[in-house]
Image: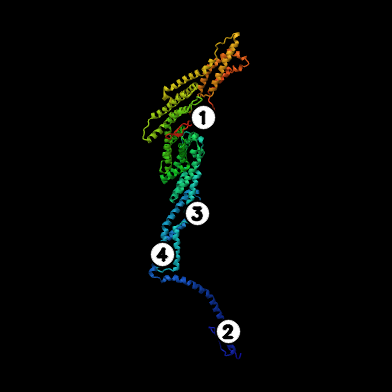
Amino acid sequence: MAGSSSCSVSVSGSVSCKSDSGIENLICASKSLKLSLEKSKSVGLALEKAGPRLDEIRVRLPWLESAVRPIRAEKDALVAVGGHINRAVGPAAAVLKVFDAVHGLEKSLLSDPRIDLPGYLSVLKRLEEALRFLGDNCGLAIQWLDDIVEYLEDNSVADQVYLKNLKKELENLKESQNGDLDGGLLDAALDKLENEFRLLLTDNSVPLPMSSDSLGDQPCIAPSPLPVSVVHKLQAILGRLRANDRLDKCVSIYVDARSSNVRASLQALNLDYLEISVSEFNDVQSIEVYIAQWGKHLEFAVKHLFEAEYKLCNDVFERLGLDVWMGCFSKIAAQAGILAFLQFGKTVTESKKDPIKLLKLLDIFASLNKLRLDFNRLFGGDACVEIQNLTRELIKSVIDGAAEIFWELLVQVELQRQNPPPPDGSVPRLVSFITDYCNKLLGDDYKPILTQVLIIHRSWKRQSFQEKLLVNEILNILKAVELNLETWIKAYDDPMLSSFFAMNNHWHLFKHLKGTKLGDLLGDSLKEHEQYKDYYSTTFLRDSWGKLPGHLSREGLILFSGGRATARDLVKKRLKKFNEVFDDMYSKQSGWIMVERDLREKTCQLIVQAVVPVYRSYMQNYGPLVEQDASSNKYAKYTVQKLEEMLLCLYRPKPARHGSMKSPQLSGKYGNGIPDLRRTASAVV
């Protein structure tokens, strides 16, 4: 077509027109502008996307700068840093490996040791070894790392921020090293072992079943109260706990468990009396039954219980040394009650003096002496010093007290002489008591003990002792009793009562000394008491009841018809006199006491023989003379049977008064402070 032109677009995007036509130029310009706008839009979008990337680059530039900074460090420093790092990494890696192993043990160590005690102890030992390794090497690893940081800092090989962070971490490691490396795992495991130790003891400690009635005379040594398998477990646990400085806690647990078991065993014996104080009883006689029990209970406790605990302590703690297991045993003995036993004995020695106390002190000494070897073996170590001291104090108090009472007995008997004799003519309490008392002191039960006590007591004073001293002293005591009797016989105003008293007491001495060791020592002089009894018996009957038949005289009684009235009057008069004398004598003597039954029955029979036959014959012959009288009861007052019954009932002791033969008391003090037997005038009654 005419006037047309062609246009083309270059590679650069410009438009060229082959036609000079204006329209075509405009078209080309329009296309060119359009292309430019699209290109600008694309550039804008590209710039918009490039912004965040620039920000990211800007943030990373400091890190990149730090990363490439070592490149700027000295070449020698860069070369050397590798060796330093290698030396530190080895120990650090080993420490980290052990730390991992420790954490791997946690599950096993937090389980119940009872399930597998040997396995538990094995794991615990591995933990201990790991902690020792950490304790030995953790510090070394930290020191190497510390050296690396110092090297990096000195040679500017690392960034300051990085170095600061490294230092902070190293400080944290150092603090951890000084604290628990295991996070408390070892303490938790040891606590579990302590609890298992306690459970093994409590589950297997069973009180010995017994009662006071089951205490026999034959001593029996109790076997070990724990099974061998349990002992082995306790030993294994002790080994680990001791290795971790927990031995004292184990000993405390053991002492509490075993002492409680012993106390439970003793509880059945009713030992409340051990807590009694001096102020709670009047004299030794009031607690005599407790003293007898004390000896049996102490022997049982020592031979059955403390002996077993002694052996068990040795079995359990033998690997730890003598001091440990002896110390443990001493604490068990003290807490279980041995001190209370000894203190009770000391309380008895502090009580008021009296002769019975001497016997009780000898009983206490005999019990202690019987257990002397056991005490020396069980409580002879340094750990038992408190028990030893209290035992020595008790023995000294027993010996001093017994010797003092024995040597004062003669003085006490002599002091009784000034008291009046008993008004009922009976055997004074002093006589009956001393007779029996001296026989006991010379008997097989007490003489060897008393001899040993006196030997020890005199040895403390550097004085010798011979057996004749003991015998002579007892004979002197008996002679003092005899002198007392002679004095009291003369003290009565009534001759009949004096003879009655003498007969009573000489027979008592003869009867209770015959066939005894004290009687054998008296020899022929003992027979004198029997002879004196016969003499005074004859005198008594002659001067008292023997005179009664004389009032029934037959003189002037002629029974013929004219003399019956006269005879009746004489019979009335003589029966009346007989009754008056009989009533007076019977009234007076019905209050007299003859303790010895054989003497009483024999004496009453003699009285009956002296009086009743005469009375019977008299009444048979002359009784009818008065029986027909209206006032016959005034004269024929007693039948023969009634008279005999009354005479046979004479001199019987009154149960309320003579039912208990207590010893004279060492009450009060006189002169030089020696206690005496005097209480009141009735002390000799």
Which secondary structure, mark 2? helix
Residue sitting at 45 percent across and 67 percent down?
162
Q: Residues within 10 Å of mark 3 (few under 14, many from 20)?
A: few
| Mark earlier in primary sequence (3, 1) | 3
Foreground disc of the pair 3, 1: 1
Foreground disc of the pair 2, 4: 4
Foreground disc of the pair 1, 2: 1
Given the image, on which type of amino acid does mark 3 rest?
Lys
Gap in angstroms between the C-alphas marked 3 and 2 = 82 Å
- Residue 148 - label: 4
Gap in angstroms between the C-alphas marked 4 and 1 = 102 Å
Question: Quick check: 120 left or right of 632?
Answer: left
Foreground disc of the pair 4, 1: 1
Foreground disc of the pair 3, 2: 3
Foreground disc of the pair 3, 4: 4
Residue 77 position in % (x across, y down)? 39, 68
| Mark earlier in primary sequence (1, 2) | 2
Residue to which mark 3 is pinned: 107
Gap in angstroms between the C-alphas marked 3 and 4 = 36 Å
Which secondary structure, mark 3? helix
The quarter of the displayed image where residue 318 is located: top left
Which secondary structure, mark 1? loop
**21 or 484, which lies in front?**
484
Image quarter (top left, top right, bottom left or bottom right) of the N terminus: bottom right
Given the image, on which type of amino acid does mark 2 rest?
Lys
Residue to which mark 1 is pinned: 660
